[in-house]
Amino acid sequence: MSRLTRNPWLIATVVLLVAITIAVFTIVKRVPDPEIATTLAQRTPDPARGQYLAILGDCAFCHTRPDGQALAGGRPLDSPLGIIYSSNITPDPDTGIGRYTFKDFARVMRLGVTPSGTRLYPAMPYTAYAKVSDEDLQDLFAYLQEKIAPVHEASRATDITWPLSIRWPLALWSGAFLDRSRFAVDGSQDAQWNRGGYLVQGLLHCGTCHTPRGLFYEEKDVSGKTNWYLSGSELDSESPVNLRGNEADGLGRWSAADIADLLKSGSNAHSAVMGTMADVVRNSTQYMTDQDLAAVAAFLKSLSPAPDAGRAHFNPSDSTLRSVMAGDEKSAGGLLYMDSCAACHRLSGGGETLAFPALAGNSSVLSEDPSSLIAVILQGARAPSTTGAPSGLTMPGFGWRYDDADIAQLATFVRSSWGNQVAPVSSSQVSTVRKRLDLTPPVH
Amino acid sequence: MAIVEKPVDVLIVGFGWTGAIMAIELARAGLNVLALERGEDASTVPNWAYPKVTDEIAQSARNGLLQNLSKSTVTIRYTKNDRALPYRQIGSFKPGTGVGGAGIHWSGVHSRVMPQELNLKSHVTARYGAHFIPAGMNLQDWGISYDELEPHFDHFERVCGTSGKAGNIRGQKLEGGNAFEAPRSQEFPLPPLTDPPTSVLFAKATRELGYHPSPLPAANASRPYTNPYGCQLGPCNFCGFCSDYGCINYSKASPQTTILPVLYRMPNFALRTNAHVLKVNTDKSGKVATSVTYVDAQGREIEQPASMVILAAFHLHNVRLMLSSGIGKPYDPGTGEGTVGRNFCYQLLNSINLFFDKSVYINQFMGSGGVGQAIDDFYGDNFDHAKLGFIGGGVIWGRQTGNGPVRGIPLPSGSPGWGSGWKAAVKENFLHTGRIESQMSNMAYRNCYLDLDPTYRDAYGTPLLRMTKNWQDNDLRMSEFFGERLSEIGKAMGATSIAGRILKRGDNWDLRPYQSTHINGGTAMGSDPKTSVVNKYLQSWDVSNLFVLGANVFAHGIGYNPTGLVGALAYWAAANIRSSYLKDPGPMVRR
């Protein structure tokens, strides 16, 4: 007997390591069960309904490459680890999901695990789709299998480098952060609220962008249990706004009808969508039924304000306008505003109803993280062309004209005028966004 | 051998106002519509994004939005005994090009027509007798009435979000609007723009003189607006960059701001740019258009078959296409026979600058294309012509359209033309200067016409369109009368000195300074195929599946800006194609 075998600590350590390895191996290698109700087998799937669900989930946007065939994948998606390319979800047997069973499909949608056991990055919002009912998944699957023409186009490997490209740790991520529960009906609320909550948490996957994320890129709340839920986030070079009831950076001053209008047409009396949200309206929410829009609006209006600490304030005031009209506004940001912004957004910062968004009290202007505001000033913004608002009104970019220091001063003016009160913007924040958008600074 | 494309239901040549109107109306009827545009595509952003578009050198001096005259132009002469020479530099008139056409660089004055102008021959004969019409004037009725067009005037104003104040709603006269206007079915979609200083002075002075000022109708939105198609306009900010410029602000009505966003969403519509149409092809009978031949950006000749062809290009190109396609009988000034090229007309413009003392402040840095006050006391036959000895009339206005150094800063006569003296005079006068103008009708004459030039050809090898035209005695007498009115008003406004341009007897058509882009006639509409090219539905008398739009269908020049009438006629034609022609293709009026 060697001394080693007699050492009880060592034995314990080895046993523990073996146990952990087995546990990890078990977690990693287990192909989990998507938990479909057995009664579902009796139900006849409805692909036409599935088409509407696909629009709600906005599958086509991520799963279609620019100028590519619909749903054949290949769109590059930015992630903290590197670029991920979306997969082909047409029913092609070799390169798409033609060989999937419904159970395979439900497993990908709810758990992010492919039939071969490969774990998906949470760029695929399975943390939200876990909320979706068996019936809706069944109809969605029927639509994809029966109504979409197969396209033979192999999915492209990610640009993520080793060792970050090792997928098995994602199983541990799922174990730690994936909430597998379906949407929980709240008996104290009416059917409209519950429908809205089901859509927002599930197929619409609003939280994917609008809920802040933790250290491990996990959404801090996917079920609306805390007021982290939908309280605003940061993503690429944008800052998805707070959708809770805060008066300044949230939806506190909007009516439910304002919210429904924005989702239906891309603009409302206060504001207009831009950036990623313009794509969402273009591809998805403009096609929602009025009933579903009203449900989503009712649910969002019910969200209590997030804690105000560190957030913006908005106390409408005409002091900026008075100072401009009196010729007293001499700040660099104010002068830039008068030169390049006031033609549309007006000296009052009030914009023009349904044409030019108001900047006074605008939640994107008042987001703690100014990335969206900076991105719009740098590269402009194009509203989606919808049935309700076909014009696709477009703001030109000013990144070619103004350097980072100028834009920081302009953004700071906008964030501190007309009653807007939120932290100033630094030129390094502008540089960061400019770099991410791959825009060159002006040549003076 | 030309490439032959797949046939379409409707082929539209030219994609400005009339092309866009016809395209959306026929696409909405379910037809498969293709538009061919010789120029480039363009939209508010990036093409007219602030601040790059407000470049006076690129737009006003170098004509950024206009037809490239080195590729194709017209030749001009005063009489048929002269040799015509090519119009090599933009001067008197400004043909547009590209998607949106002249609807991009227009100012936005959005008038209708005076009902008597549409039957001027009958009206003049009834009031003054047939002998009142001078020899050599081809005066004729248009074959259409104001009442028939009213719903289409109204609709086009709603599409444009036109700002104004009605003076007559269904016969009821209203305070604040134009006392002379024909009945409207309803109020303007938007209230008038705020008057700039020149217009305020003009309104006060003309009222004191006993005239009847009212706001000019302007297709520059005074409020945010959503039109019947759902397109959104933002209110005008008076930046003063309208005429010669694309609007930065979605405020000036153009095909881009009012129609195209909706049209582009329709799957049964397609547009090909850089497609220069050479001719309309007909079958052996010569009575049915079968296709058009065009040259694409690569220089390839392409044949595009279609069931219907719509000529919707600018005036000059529409008339030339009729001539080079051999459709209709070309006008012969010797015999007076033939119709294509007949009734070629223009418009007269007198413009005077008013210089005030330092107590009158006029901010020349601001303005809007259509804003202003106007009087119609001397429009059409609103005043007794019996003792005046001319036919015609016009509108007198005090507008403020924005000015800048490159566009030319007016100075009192006697000021130095350059150097420090000029600078001092500019500084002295710029903020104390106003302008008033009269824009007057131009009648049709036997010796003013269009035909194909025997000498000059364009870059595609097609003969250039030749203009034979000069001012005629009748119109210059009228102009002199208006010159007196302008002086009278200018003095009443309090001007300390007046300088400007009044056309007088003996003056020739000067091609160098800008005058007006409102050229018209050449394919006149009418009820008599001997004197008109198209019937009241703008359908060719000779080829019934060919429709011709644009100011070229005017039987004579009107005093108002033509866009309102051109747009209304396009909507009228589209409505009748939908309600009648599509059900029973063929001549809509029996010869």
Image: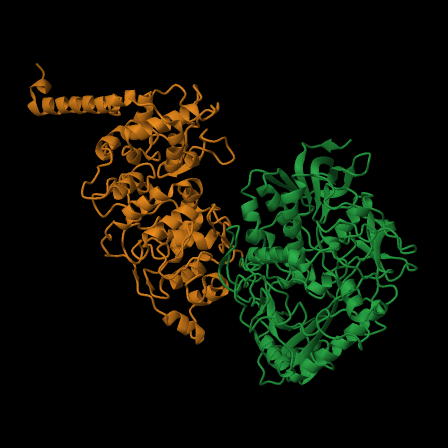
- Residue B182 visible from this viewpoint: yes
> Could you tell whether B148 is left or right of B553 in the image?
left
- Residue B398 visible from this viewpoint: no
Chain identifier of the orange chain = A
Label count reads 0
Q: Quadrant location of the N terminus of chain B? A: top right
User: Which residue appears at 47% of the width and 49% of the height?
Assistant: A389
| In the image, farthest residue toward the front | B126
- Residue B106, picture quadrant: bottom right
**Residue A150 pos. (x, y %):** 47, 23
User: Which residue appears at 28% of the width and 31% of the height?
Assistant: A133
| In the image, farthest residue toward the top | A1
**Residue B19 pos. (x, y %):** 65, 48
- Say which of B118 and A141 sits in front: B118
- Residue B95, picture quadrant: bottom right
- Say which of B7 and B65 sits in front: B7
Q: Is residue B124 above or below residue A234?
A: below
User: Which residue appears at 39% of the width and 62% of the height?
Assistant: A414
* Colouring used for the render: by chain
Q: Is residue B414 above or below residue B25?
A: below
Q: Is residue B290 above or below residue B110?
A: above
**Residue A151 pos. (x, y %):** 48, 24
- Residue B493, picture quadrant: bottom right
> Could you tell whether B565 is left or right of A369 in the image?
right
Chain identifier of the green chain = B
**Residue B561 pos. (x, y %):** 68, 63
> Could you tell whether A402 is left or right of B486 in the image?
left
Q: Is residue B37 above or below residue B365?
A: above
